[in-house]
Amino acid sequence: MKMQNFKTMSCTKTKFATKDFAEFSLKKIAKTNTKVKPIRSYYCEECKCWHLTKNVDSKDYSKLIQENKTLKTTIIKLNEQIKLLEKTDTSQKIIAQLNKQLEEAKNRPSKADNVQARADERVIELKKQLKSKQRESKN
Ligand SMILES: [Zn+2]
């Protein structure tokens, strides 16, 4: 007696001659109210037929887990790159703004002088206020 025949005898699941028949049955069952439904078809080496199973393919499952891990790592890396790009972009904007201000200051020295003068006035004013406060605290 060949091992092949013995195994074929032991295969009790519903047999489908082709993948198409198995898939057709799978779709039909999916529409029913059956609680436990098969999710995929697979080729059986024992009876050389197709069966249905509710179990996730272990190879697919571990592959999915690996893909998920890779995806998570990719997301983290992308977020880091986005942050770096944002920083760079902001820096570039600030530099551009500063260059613009510098150009304006060069082209309009009178206005720049005016700003400097006002700043000086403000410093003098603050020094005055500070002196008066110091006097107040002494008295
Ligand atoms: Zn089988």
Image: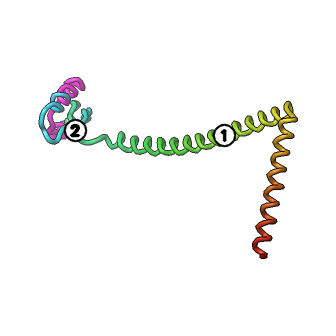
Residue found at x 36% / y 39%? 60
Q: Quadrant of ligand 1?
A: top left
Q: Which mark is residue 34?
A: none
Q: Is residue 6 magenta?
A: yes
Residue found at x 79% / y 58%? 126
Left/right of residue 83 with respect to residue 122 in the rendered view = left
* Residue 3, position as x, y percentages in the image: 22, 40
Residue found at x 63% / y 42%? 84
Q: How is the image coloured?
A: rainbow
Nearest-to-viewer mark from 2 and 1: 1
Left/right of residue 17 with respect to residue 113 in the rendered view = left
Q: Count the numbered circles shown.
A: 2
**Viewer-proximal residue, 3 or 52?**
52
Quarter containing the C terminus: bottom right
Q: Which residues are magenta?
A: 1-26
* Residue 16, position as x, y percentages in the image: 18, 28
Residue found at x 76% / y 38%? 98
Q: Quadrant of residue 115?
A: top right
Q: Which mark is residue 90?
A: 1
Q: Which mark is residue 53?
A: 2
Quarter containing the N terminus: top left
10 Å crowding of disc 1: few (<14), some (14-19), many (20+): few
Amino acid at pointer 1: Thr
- Asked which secondary structure carries label 1, the reply is helix
Q: Main secondary structure of the magenta part?
A: helix
10 Å crowding of disc 2: few (<14), some (14-19), many (20+): some
* Residue 50, position as x, y percentages in the image: 22, 31
Of labels 2 and 1, earlier in sequence is: 2
- Asked which secondary structure carries label 2, the reply is strand
Amino acid at pointer 2: Thr
